[in-house]
Image (spheres, rainbow, N blue to C red):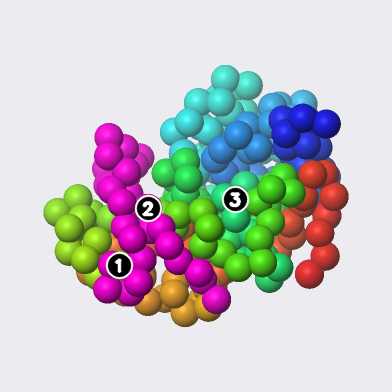
Amino acid sequence: MTKDELKRLSAEAALGFVEDGSIVGVGTGSTVAFFIDGLARLRDRIRGTVSSSEQSTQRLRGHGIPVFDLNEVGTLGLYVDGADECDPRNCLIKGGGGALTREKIIAQASRNFVCIIDAGKQVEVLGAFPLPVEVIPMARRSVAETLAAMGGKPAWREGVVTDNGNVILDVHGLRIVDPVGLEREINQVPGVVTVGLFAARPADVVIVDGVRRGL
């Protein structure tokens, strides 16, 4: 099977978690795009969605699926999103698409976080994929210096502005053996909006190439 076919299998498997009459949290990325396309078949069974990015919002509305502000709905039963890396404990690196802050907010607001990936995203230790950090623009240099002092090699993702109006530093050269601790440490740096480590709130379920992975 091609990578796209495997992504579609994972997206289709995630549709099984959608409950009638619910509002579904929807993430961002190429695998999630397949989930959105599948969700279009269920749009008459759900109340609508909460979206993590303008890109996903446009795709959802293009299918005629309502998109709500999270403040209107509060806690969600389900959030479906992809990941750039996933370790055996379901801790994730996310943010390759630049939507990490909104993704983290929706994940935190959801009772069940289903992560859909292809097998190539599975790793034993996080960090081969550069770790995204969303930063307030005026703090880009000072945050980069702090991240370098932590042992990383931060690179400004030039030309990219997040949906929140901020910039992204991608931190290379990390081997993240304590994802929860590093997430906490980076989030405390002044100027950091959030880091693309989803470890304090990891995925509840991971679907790999259409198959649910056990912990």
The residue at the point 47 percent across, 41 percent down is: 97
Q: Do the residues under discs 2 and 3 have CB atoms within 8 angstroms?
A: no
Counting the numbered discs, the total is 3
Is 149 contained in the magenta span? yes
Instruction: Identify the residue under disc 1.
Output: 147
- Amino acid found under the numbered disc labelled 2: Asp
Instruction: Identify the residue under disc 2.
Output: 170
Q: Is residue 81 above or below residue 150?
A: above
Q: Earlier in the sequence, mark 2 or mark 3?
A: 3
Q: Earlier in the sequence, mark 1 or mark 3?
A: 3
Instruction: Identify the residue under disc 3.
Output: 83
- Amino acid found under the numbered disc labelled 3: Ala
Please state which of the two labelled residues, at mark 1 or mark 3, is closer to the viewer.
1
The residue at the point 85 percent across, 50 percent down is: 211
Q: Is residue 192 above or below residue 200?
A: above
**Taking the image as drawn, is residue 142 in sight?**
yes
**Taking the image as drawn, is residue 45 in sight?**
no
The residue at the point 14 percent across, 54 percent down is: 138
Q: Residue 205 location, x and y as percent?
A: 74, 60
Residue span colored magenta: 148-177
The residue at the point 63 percent across, 38 percent down is: 32
The Cα atoms of the two marked residues, 2 and 1, are separated by 10 Å
Tell me: 124 left or right of 9.
Answer: left
